[in-house]
Amino acid sequence: MVRSVLEQARDGDAGAFRELVEPYRGELHLHCYRMLGSLADAEDLVQETLLAAWRGLGGFAGRSSVRTWLYRIATNRCRNALRDARRRIPAEPVPPFVPPAPSRRATVTWLQPYPDAALDRIAERAPDPAARYLSRETVELAFVLAVQQLPPRQAAVLLLCDVLDFGRTEVAEMLDTTPTAVKGALQRARAGLTANEHRPGGPDAGELAVARRFAAAFTADDVDGVLALLTDEAWLAMPPAPHEYHGAAAIRAFLAASARGRGGRRLRLVPAGANRQPAFGCYLDDRPAPARATPEAPAAVRSATAEAARPGSGTRTVAGADDRAGPGASDAARSGASDAARSGASDAARSGADDRAGPGAFVGVVVLTPAAGRIGRITRFLDPSLAAAFGLPSHRG
């Protein structure tokens, strides 16, 4: 009689265990990222989840699917991490120039972007149809940021019910509570979020056109050109720095101070799709900035932005298990990208702002949030470790 993969895994067959859990690794990582907001923390919790699953496999009775069982473990591990304050809070970067006073100081400084290529792989490989469909509003930075500000139980219920489409009774069992409690938590969580427009897929043609214009102006230090693309309520954030600049005047003051602080050295942008939004990897060049931006983006910027729109371009897998995850680890996961992400806080603190980096050095990722045909938010992640997560070189000639 042929024994099932589950039976073989229960008997200690590591290969069978990998076969059992590996199809769910990517979506579990995304789930942990949504709950925690950090690639590094999400990777740690995926490792904990797989190790707990390996150790607890003998107690899995099969009353639910393997996928549901893994989500139960992952969700509760994330809740425990949030309650126990085990989140890795990054150090605040120290700029080498005096920045203008911020409009406000953010409390969520651990937020990191999620590479589009990893989202593409999840959609392609997930065995469950619900996991293959990744609607844009559930991976955008605004949604992930909003989830960070919910109590852990509300965040868990919202993600399990509204994003992953588990039933309330099923979620109640996963969280060891009642369907009535789940209903109440879901109502409170929804009330704490702003409804987003339903937008499957990545950036559309109009958003990419705005991104091209932004790239041309931003890399030329054309502050007026950048401001012309923003909405009236636009703001600039720079995790892990807590500084936020709201409105044209505040953003102008910071961009001008940043350009002066670089002493004429310019920034370069290369495609790095993130969270289904227009995004770029940012490098500090040693070439002087031009006097003003050209009306049309350079050919290199145009082609780079078009490449960013192509699924799977310019990125590689963010996460995977390493040897600490035991039998659940995959070979591809041992590349070290997660270790690089884990070092992001110290790297960002050491690098400070742009002109502390060397010529051609990767200094972070810029993500644009489209709004009404313009840009509603610029999120500039000051984190050199993101180069590995996005499959970008740490230096460019």
Image (spheres, rainbow, N blue to C red):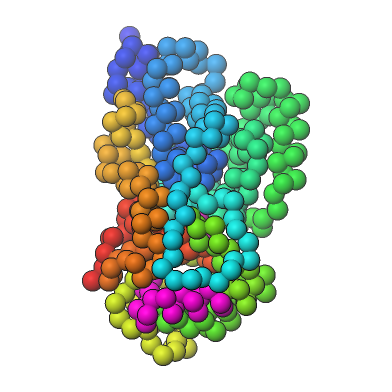
Is 276 inside the magenta-drawn segment?
Answer: yes
Residue 280 visible from this viewpoint: no
Extreme-top residue of the structure? 1
If the image is split into quadrants, where does the N terminus sit? top left
Whether residue 160 sits left or right of residue 272 in the image: it is right
The image quarter in which residue 18 lies: top left
Extreme-left residue of the structure? 397
- Establish if 67 lies above or below 258: above
In the image shown, does 193 or 245 lie closer to the viewer?
Answer: 245
If the image is split into quadrants, where does the C terminus sit? bottom left
Whether residue 157 sits left or right of residue 285 in the image: it is right
Whether residue 90 sits left or right of residue 320 in the image: it is right
- Establish if 194 lies above or below 69: below
In the image shown, does 352 or 276 lie closer to the viewer?
Answer: 352
Q: Residue at x 50, y 39 (%)?
A: 87
Residue 238 % position (x, y): 50, 61
Is 238 inside the magenta-drawn segment?
Answer: no
In the image shown, does 394 or 168 lie closer to the viewer?
Answer: 394
Magenta segment:
252-277
The image quarter in which residue 93 lies: bottom left
Q: Residue at x 36, y 57 (%)?
A: 350
- Establish if 319 lies above or below 305: above
Residue 87 visible from this viewpoint: yes
- Establish if 167 lies above or below 148: above
Q: Residue at x 46, y 74 (%)?
A: 258
Residue 147 % position (x, y): 61, 45
In the image shown, does 80 or 209 lie closer to the viewer?
Answer: 80
Q: Residue at x 44, y 78 (%)?
A: 259
